[in-house]
Amino acid sequence: MQLSRKQTPFFYFILTGILTLVQIILFSQAGSYWQIILLIAFAVLLSSIIFYILFFYIQPKASFFQSSFHWVQVLKTIFLHSNSLLSIKEGQIDQDYFLLNTKPRDACVYIHPDSAASIVNSRGDFRVVSSGFHELRFGESITTSFPLGMQTISCGPQEGENPFSKRKSGENYTSFHARHLRAQMVHSVTADHQEVFPVFTIQYCLCKDGEFISETLLDIAKLLSQNNMSGPASPAINAIITKQICAYWSARMQKAPLAAFLSGASGNSFQNILLDMNMYLNPAHSEKRPSSTAQLDNKPLAEIAHLKIPFIRVYLTNVWYLNMTYSSQEVMERTI
């Protein structure tokens, strides 16, 4: 008779009760050497079963032998202070795993529900694992860890920073250099040679309806591996997204004078650029992407589209530019 998955926990609950009763009897009558040995053996077996019952609700598809392996790894970590048990939370491995020259040959990985990871074996085959306990087999290693929650990136001058201002009195060189880099990242020039500094807020998520898409994570892991990159995926993804969005914005700015963008003439408003950008990046609207006449404009975004991120949205917070008149120049900040 084979037990179903639903019946399995109840079976082990009953078995745990019987073993507990046997241990109580042995403990109360332990007077000989073999009874003490038997008591220890039952205690080990009981602990394994209790761990399996708890493990069943974390990783329902694991067998008793798999949960026993994980139980051993937990004990090794606690008593031997080894790196046998790894933990991934919010896309980060708690231990300095990626800094180790020699990775653990066998290890157990616990992944929190807000994360996922890619694992590669000695043959170069990748697999993606999500929440629960997982075994790192011989020759396998973790290449990338992913956060599955909503990620937010800010790109451009921070609040209160004027990208046109020079180094202020009392401002140290480190602060000025950081402020300058934030401004130059989004720096663009219009067709009439006017400087524009946008401020973007970008949100993306690597899962859809609470479920991650393994093909997306595999593509990202392979892309990073081809570039000899490993570790948390967020910094690499953030760099790709911000670089490509800034390149797209800069290309669009060069096609018209500043006055056209401010007035919205010929569809050249800031809002239209943002709409085209989001339409192209959103997989749910792939059939509505701009026609071949606009594909050249969207070429800088091709690398982001290749990542197949389930959800990505770009917001334009505000725009800095110079208000040119015959007699003066005034720095303007427009909130979008």
Image (tube, grey):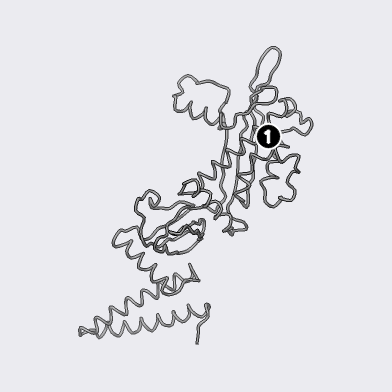
Q: Is residue 317 above or below residue 284?
A: above
81 and 15: which is toward the camera: 81
Q: Look at the numbered disc 1 and give the secondary structure of its residue.
A: loop
Q: Is residue 92 left or right of residue 296?
A: left
Q: Residue at point 63% right, 28% down?
A: 188
Q: Residue at point 54% right, 31% down?
A: 182
Q: Is residue 200 left or right of residue 222?
A: right
Place residue 110 in its image quadrant: bottom left
Q: Is residue 52 above or below residue 92?
A: below
Q: Residue furthest front?
A: 123
Q: Is residue 250 above or below residue 66?
A: above
Place residue 31 in its image quadrant: bottom left
Q: Is residue 65 above or below residue 212?
A: below
The three-letter amino acid code for the residue at tag 1 is Ile
Rendered-image quadrant of the C terminus: top right
Q: Residue furthest top?
A: 327
Give the x, y percent position of residue 13.
44, 79
Q: How many labels sit on residues?
A: 1
149 and 67: which is toward the camera: 67
Give the x, y percent position of residue 250.
64, 32
Give the x, y percent position of residue 164.
58, 23
Question: Which residue bears the numbered disc 1?
Answer: 336
Q: Residue furthest bottom?
A: 1
Q: Residue furthest right?
A: 266
Q: Residue at point 61% right, 35% down?
A: 246
Give the x, y percent position of residue 225.
49, 50
How crowded pointer 1 is (Cα within 10 Å; few <14, some 14-19, many 20+) is rated as: few
Q: Residue at point 59% right, 51% down?
A: 205
